Amino acid sequence: MKARVHVMLKNGVLDPQGEAVRHALGAMGFDGVEGVRQGKVIDLTLAEGTTEAQVVEMCDKLLANTVIESYEIELG
Amino acid sequence: MKARVHVMLKNGVLDPQGEAVRHALGAMGFDGVEGVRQGKVIDLTLAEGTTEAQVVEMCDKLLANTVIESYEIELG
């Protein structure tokens, strides 16, 4: 089975990577870019029978820094 | 309007970040992790009227290195 995890900085946490991308797009002539947030996506290939609770545990213990990051899990 | 872009290393391109995560999860006792690929997710807030073609241009010119990375765009 597959799981996709998105890890994003929480709202209110400064995102210098996203700001750099926004600035670069503006400098390249893309005028309509109002905001950019950059995060990580982690695609996991898991043994059959792995539960969502185990993926949540992976996120809490390793994949996300829950002080400043939030995560979303999609099982597929 | 919002757009979400996923940028992943192409299949066949070594992903040392993903390998490091896979190894760390195994060392932490998560046995069912068969593979991990890590990429970037970029959330764009765009002016109304921005076209998908413009987002494709942003990806080709800045957001992805199309030699080794592929990207997917979701408009929402």
Image (cartoon, coloured by chain):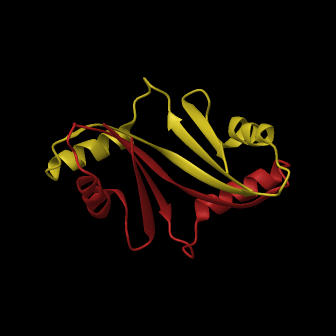
Chain colours: A red, B yellow
Q: Residue B60's quadrant in the figure?
A: top right
B7, B49: nearer the viewer: B49
Q: Residue B51's quadrant in the figure?
A: top right
User: Image height check: is B62 above or below A5?
Assistant: above
Would residue A21 appear left or right of B52 to someone viewing this image?
Answer: left
Residue drawn where x is 74% and y is 42% of the image: B55
| Residue A21: percent from left, percent from top | 68, 54
Count of all numbered marks drawn on residues in the image: 0
| Residue A65: percent from left, percent from top | 37, 66
Would residue A18 appear left or right of A75 to someone viewing this image?
Answer: right
User: Image height check: is A50 above or below B44?
Assistant: above
Residue drawn where x is 32% and y is 58% of the image: A59
Instruction: Assign the N terminus of chain B to one quadrant of the image.
Output: bottom right
Q: Which residue is farthest bottom? A: A12
User: Image height check: is B23 above or below A24?
Assistant: above
| Residue A54: percent from left, percent from top | 23, 54
User: Image height check: is B58 above or below A59?
Assistant: above
Residue drawn where x is 42% and y is 23% of the image: B12
Residue drawn where x is 86% and y is 51% of the image: B49
